[in-house]
Amino acid sequence: MRELNPDPELSIYILYRDVRTYGFLEEYYQKARDNGILFIRYEKEEKPIVKKNGNGLRVKVQDFILGAHLIIEPDLVVLSPAIVPRKDAFDISQMLKVPLNEDGFFLEAHVKLRPVDFATEGVFLAGLAHSPKTIDESISQAKAASARACTIISKDKYEAEAIIASVNEDICSGCGVCESLCSYGAPEIVIKDGRRVSQVNKALCKGCGSCVSACPSGAMQQLGFKSQQTLTMMNAALV
């Protein structure tokens, strides 16, 4: 606004709860301060009050630095809407088996190593679905997500994770603990030869090991990390 109207008589106030000026965005904040724009922080319990004042508006806000209320009669009031998660984010997370963070935005597999991936293979994220961010950041993340997707669709065949869970049906009791714990819906209780047993969908299993550690009968084992294999390695290390 200051660049569009350099009139020295023009006063600009920014009323805010929090300011995010990470990285090079600090330059914009500093430039605004240097140009005389006033930043006034208000508390959640003391929100600004906007009322009609004749043909104009009147804004009342508590300035905690001055310890007094300020009355501003602006020519123009511009509202900056909050960025919040979509209401159907939870339904999508349940459908695709992907996690949300404490604020309701989608959570990546790893903030540094896999910033646009989910633990669920073949599903990627970008933009405001991930968190509040600038347009430049959203574009960069979208390019990264599309590049990651190309690594899958450019192949004739896609190899699933080899380290997955398997079931020893002879000792499986069909209790359903593995089915209730799995975040990916890989184990399923079926009726086989008149018995309830668990079966693992190899395409859905991500090898997290949750079902293996929780199985009360020991029927669920991790390929490559079966109990006997692990114990043998431990005994060899202790000798």
Image (cartoon, grey):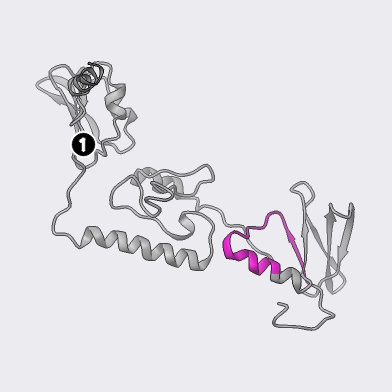
Residue 66: image quadrant is: bottom right
Horizontal placement of 124 versus 67: left or right?
A: left
- CA neighbours of label 1 inside 10 A, class few (<14), some (14 to 19), many (20+): some
The residue furthest front is 239
Residue 95: image quadrant is: top left
Q: Is residue 162 above or below residue 56?
A: above
Horizontal placement of 41 versus 116: left or right?
A: right
Q: Amino acid at mark 1?
A: Ile
Note whether residue 171 is visible. Answer: yes
Q: Residue at x 46, y 55 (%)?
A: 129
Q: Is residue 103 above or below residue 15?
A: above
The picture places residue 232, in percent across and down from the top left corner, at 18, 20
Q: Residue at x 40, y 53 (%)?
A: 115
Residue 28: image quadrant is: bottom right
Return the residue nearer the eye: 70 or 92. 70
Q: Secondary structure at mark 1?
A: loop
Q: Residue at x 16, y 25 (%)?
A: 191
The picture places residue 29, in percent across and down from the top left corner, at 68, 66
Quarter occupied by the C terminus = top left
Q: Which residues are magenta?
A: 12-30
The picture places residue 116, in percent across and down from the top left corner, at 38, 55
Note whether residue 77 is visible. Answer: no
Q: Is residue 162 above or below residue 210?
A: below
The picture places residue 148, in percent across and down from the top left corner, at 30, 59
Return the residue nearer the eye: 204 or 53. 204
| Residue highlighted by disc 1 | 163
Q: Residue at x 65, y 64 (%)?
A: 80
Q: Is residue 24 magenta?
A: yes
Q: Is residue 198 magenta?
A: no
Quarter occupied by the N terminus = bottom right
